[in-house]
Image (cartoon, coloured by chain):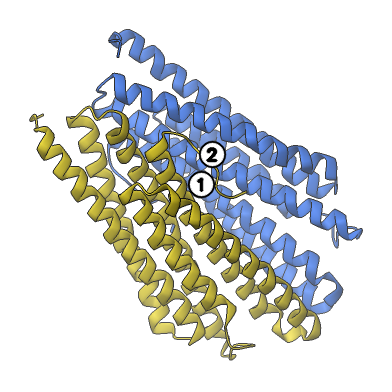
Chain colours: A blue, B yellow
């Protein structure tokens, strides 16, 4: 195994973070498209989200290999070690978010297959998706910059997402009770809301990784 | 950082696996208890599951620290490195499973709070939970023993869990359509079924880690 200099190591670490940011940006887009495919009942767009999941899986594998290479060829200590370890966990969170986006796109396909229009125009669900995307972006910034304050902000956005989820849940239950014909679709929309809430939880995990990176301590941002 | 001998390293690796098995066994129990709390509508049991989640979180942190210590004080290569990396990912999967068990226990509390009995005796949900527990056990055995064949078996159990989930989904939709009074509880049970399906997915992830450990290749067992 060739020895590499500290400078090269730090360049590799820099490049690793750039790759993680690129993966994050792909994930943000895929969340946006999944929810757009649902709001428009656009099967083609939904299928593109599902097909695109493979690309994100491949990015995860590539970054994971790079983390392992850095661990194996160097003996990173303290903060460098934590940066790699945190990166390693972050890509798992990003990949899971993309899976949820794919799940949402699958629901679009199922609703399209029923031939029914949406039982209501979607307002809160796209709002949740926007918040979740913003959380992904901010949590990755917090990781790259080692910004603990920014990481703590994520928890506030997560509370908003949770509130929206509860609101959507109650609203959809009312729809179902008032008109049983809406039950099947309302159930699907409940799952979408739950998936977005989970995506926000994963962004919160990334915020926790950023805090761990700086402080060396594990802190739970959400309960 | 004190140097440790190869023999000590291998003892540490052995101990690491034992800790992971203990965590797995706790997670199996917590899944069983969560579903039992639901089947019996036992709020006390549900609360114990929720409170116990903290213990599993602590186990994860402790094992994670041990993985980091091994990475930092040794330069494990090839299979040893993969064993630690796989261990690292496995505890994340186990911790997420415990979170889902906790989510199920939360649903028990909500249903208990309505004062309503179950809309039907639970049969398929406990069956899913048993399958999921068995998958956790087998996937961890596959990891510890490096048994690729056993890891591939997990995928078959996962298919059974998916089938049960689809069956429960259809059945509960029928309940809701026939009697709108069941909607609220049926929705909760749908989520329980979905959480168990996710738990099985996490066990499948562990199976994939076992394959990676032996072959050095990442393989998707479920789609």
Q: Are marks 1 and 2 in contact (CB under 8 Å)?
A: yes
- Chain letter for the residue marked with disc 1 in the picture: A
Residue shown at the point (48%, 76%) measured from the top left: B35
- Residue at x 48%, y 46% (from the top left corner): A204
Q: Residue B110, image x and y in percent?
A: 54, 78
Q: Is residue B6 left or right of residue B82?
A: left
Image position of B33 with respect to B2: above or below: below
Q: Which secondary structure lies at badge 2?
A: helix
What element does badge 1 sit on?
A: helix
**Is there any visible trace of residue A179 in the rendered image?**
no
Q: On residue A94, which mark appears?
A: 2
Of pointers 1 and 2, the one earlier in the residue sequence: 2
Vertical comparison of B147 with B168: above or below: above
Q: Quadrant of the C terminus of chain A?
A: bottom left
**Chain containing the residue with disc 2:** A
Closer to viewer: mark 1 or mark 2: 2
Q: Label 1 belongs to which residue? A: A202
Residue ID at (61%, 74%): B188
From the viewer's perspective, tell me whether residue A4 is left or right of residue A109. Answer: left
Q: Is residue B23 left or right of residue B124?
A: left
């Amino acid at each position: 195994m060739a020895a590499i200099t500290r400078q090269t190591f730090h360049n590799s670490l820099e490049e690793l973070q750039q790759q993680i940011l690129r993966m994050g940006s792909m994930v943000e887009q895929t969340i946006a498209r999944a929810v757009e495919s649902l709001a428009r009942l656009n099967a083609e767009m939904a299928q593109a989200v599902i097909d695109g999941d493979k690309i994100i899986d491949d990015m995860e594998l590539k970054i994971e290999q790079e983390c392992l290479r850095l661990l194996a060829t160097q003996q990173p200590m303290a903060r460098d070690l934590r940066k790699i370890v945190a990166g390693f966990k972050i890509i798992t969170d990003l990949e899971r978010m993309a899976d949820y986006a794919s799940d949402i796109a699958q629901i679009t396909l199922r609703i399209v297959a029923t031939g029914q229009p949406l039982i209501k125009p979607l307002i809160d669900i796209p709002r949740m998706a926007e918040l979740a995307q913003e959380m992904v972006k901010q949590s990755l910034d917090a990781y790259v910059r080692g910004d603990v304050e920014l990481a703590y902000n994520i928890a506030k956005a997560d509370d908003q997402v949770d509130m929206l989820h509860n609101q959507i849940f109650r609203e959809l239950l009312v729809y179902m009770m008032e008109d049983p014909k809406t039950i099947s679709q309302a159930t699907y929309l409940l799952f979408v809301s739950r998936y977005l809430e989970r995506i926000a939880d994963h962004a919160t995990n990334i915020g926790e990784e950023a805090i761990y990176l700086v402080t060396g301590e594990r802190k739970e941002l959400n309960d």
